Amino acid sequence: MQKTLIHFADLIKLQHTLFALPFALISAILAWKMTDSFHWIHLAGIVICMVTARSAAMAFNRLIDSTYDAENPRTALRHIPAGLIKKNHVLAFVIINSLAFLISCSLFLIVDNPWPLVFGLPVLLFLLAYSYAKRFTSLCHFWLGLALALSPIGAWVAIRGMAWSESPIPLMLTGAVFFWVSGFDMLYACQDEAFDKAKGLFSVPARIGLRNTLRLAFLCHIAMIVFLLGFYWLASPTLGNIYLGGVMIVTCLVVYQHSLVNENDLSKVNQAFFNVNAIISVGLLLVVILQICLD
């Protein structure tokens, strides 16, 4: 049983929840700060929703892509093609996590907020549908970006409901996550340029080549910085110089991230993709917490 749990945790890359969860918590912190109404249901619901939704979507992606994974030398040793986990077990895992996500959305009814439950099923279907995107559109990377970018605005709605008068604040953070994830997914997809071309898949590297993909990913990350600054502008005076310092560090990390990858050497893509991005997301969360605590 323990070995099976380890396989499933590795299948969905559970540790990569760090990519989106910190941004959801940043949004939640600002919402709590503005309303002065922290409730443990909010925190528990947001965390459970994030983990279960991502687990369902990631497992579904591995299930749908298992045939391609088996044919791709880079991914042939993933759990399903390698025979470590059976497809029907993965499907059951997807169903369980999907139901757990919808149930966790209902937690917010305790604090008289029906909106997470109202939006729960459409959001879940959007997340699951991403797995098919690369088969028909080169916008697949932006689809993934939007899927993860729903986390900040989702956390905001979970706490404040449909308070549209303040919507630009979480939308700025949503924009930052959208361009951040879209950009680094393009970097990651560079590894499969030849395979995607051979299989007729619509990834950006397969459509416009490595050099142009790297340029587009860099432009996306510049846009991310712009949105992070816009988030500061809208959320000030709650956010101050500490946050701005954090954004400066993030800018340096983005430049470093792109220095690790070029069209002739993709050997450090995983280092740029996983290590640097984890530092960016967790680091920004810690910076916001520090800013709020010292305010």
Image (cartoon, rainbow, N blue to C red):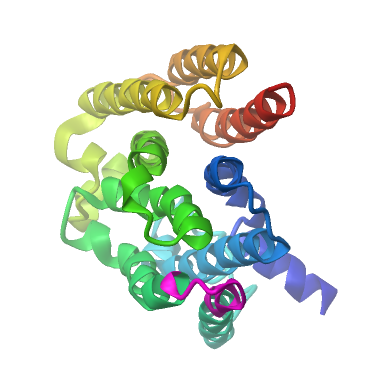
**Residue 88 in view (yes/no):** yes
Left or right, 77 with reference to 2:
left
* Number of marks: 0
Can you say which quadrant of the picture contains the C terminus?
top right
State the residue in front, 37 or 139: 37
The residue under the point 36% across, 27% down is 227
Q: Looking at the picture, does residue 77 appear above or below residue 24?
A: below
Where residue 208 sits, quadrant-wise, is: top left
**Magenta stretch holds residue 108:** yes
**Residue 64 in view (yes/no):** no
Left or right, 173 with reference to 289:
left
The residue under the point 64% across, 73% down is 84
The residue under the point 31% across, 25% down is 223
Bounds of the magenta segment: 105-115
Q: Looking at the picture, does residue 191 appear above or below residue 135?
A: above
Left or right, 227 with reference to 199:
right
**Magenta stretch holds residue 36:** no
**Whole-percent x, y for residue 52 in the image:** 58, 69
State the residue in front, 231 or 62: 231
Can you say which quadrant of the picture contains the N terminus?
bottom right
**Whole-percent x, y for residue 244 in the image:** 53, 14
